[in-house]
Image (cartoon, helix red, strand yellow):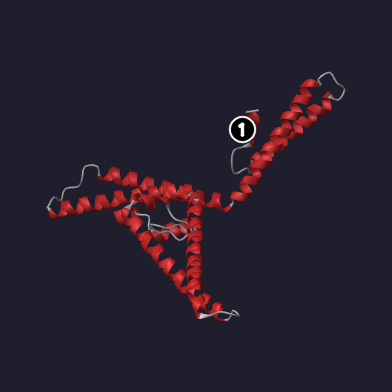
Amino acid sequence: MPSLTNLRITEDELERLTGLDISDTFMGRAIRPSVLRSRRRLRSLLMSEVLTLGLSIIFCLPVSLVIARNLPGFTGEDLGKFLAISLGIAVGLFALWNGYLWRQGKQLSQLSHLLDQVDRHNEIIDAIALMEELDSVRANNHEPVDRQEIFQALDATRSSLICALTTERIVRKHQKMIAKHAELAEAIAQNLAMLQTLQENATANKYGQFLTEALSIGIIVQQELSEFMPSESLSNRWSNE
C-alpha cells in the first residue's frame, strides 16, 4: 500500500505532466482562475502584480528619460509631462500583459479545472496526515477502520488525474491538428450525404451503379480516416446525418 507522501501529486510532477510551470497562481503564462476563490492565492497574485508593475515602471522611466533628453527642444519644464506619459505607458503595458495572462487562463480552462482537482486531492491527503498525527499524539495507535480503502481510493484518483493531465497536454499540443481533422470530417460527412441522396434518387438511372460504387468508396474513406481521428469518429458523424 503506498504511503501518503507517494500519493501526493507534486508541483515537479505537474510540470512534467503538463509541460508548463505550475504554481498556486500561475500555469505557464496564464493566471489560474482559482486564485479568485482563495484569499491566500489572491494575496500571492497581488504581490506578484505589484512587483511586475514596479519593474515595468523602473524599466520604462529611465529609458524614457534617456530618449527625452536626446529630443530636440527638450527642456526641464517638459520633464514632468514626459514622466507622466512614461508612467502611463508603463501602466498600459502592465494592463495589456495582465489581459494576455487572463486570456491565456481562459484558453487553458480544462487544465485549470484539472489542477483544481489535483489541489483537492492533495488537500485530502494533508487532512488524513493531520488526522493520523493527532491520533499518534493521543496515543491512539490502532489503524483507522477505512485506512486501506481510502488509500486505494486516493491511489485510483491519483492515477486518474495523471491520465487526465497527460491527455490534456496531448490534446493541447495537437489542438490545431484536431481542429483540422474535425473540419475534414465534416466535409466528408457532407459529401457522403450528397452521394447517398444522389444514389437514392437515381436507382433507375443507368448511372445508378456508378453512384452506388462512389458511395461505397466514400464510406471506405470515412472508415479509414476514422482509424486515426483523434476526436469524434466519422462513423458517428455519418450516422447522425
User: Relative to residue 208, is residue 188 drawn left or right?
Assistant: left
Please report the residue visible at 34 percent of the width from the left and 48 percent of the height from the top. 120
Count all numbered tags in the image, as a single digit. Answer: 1
| Residue found at the far top of this picture | 204
Pick the front one: 73 or 147: 73
User: Relative to residue 224, is residue 102 drawn left or right?
Assistant: left
Please report the residue visible at 46 percent of the width from the left and 59 percent of the height from the top. 16
In this orientation, does residue 7 appear? Answer: yes
Q: Position of residue 113 (x, y in %)?
A: 43, 47
Q: Quadrant of the C terminus?
A: top right
In this orientation, does residue 60 appear? Answer: no
In the displayed structure, 99 sits above or below 58; it is above
| Residue found at the far left of this picture | 139
Q: Which residue is mark 1?
A: 236
Residue 73 figure quarter: bottom right
Q: Position of residue 93 (x, y in %)?
A: 51, 63
Pick the front one: 108 or 164: 108
Q: Crowding near pointer 1: few (<14 within 10 Å), some, many (20+)?
A: few
Please report the residue visible at 34 percent of the width from the left and 54 percent of the height from the top. 8
Q: Give, as a three-letter code, the residue at label 1.
A: Asn
Q: Kindly state the secondary structure of the residue where label 1 is placed.
A: helix
Pick the front one: 174 or 5: 174
Pick the front one: 229 or 106: 106
Q: Position of residue 166 (x, y in %)?
A: 49, 51
| Residue found at the far front of this picture | 77
User: Relative to residue 94, is residue 208 drawn left or right?
Assistant: right
Q: Position of residue 75 (x, y in %)?
A: 53, 80
Please report the residue visible at 51 percent of the width from the left and 72 percent of the height from the top. 82
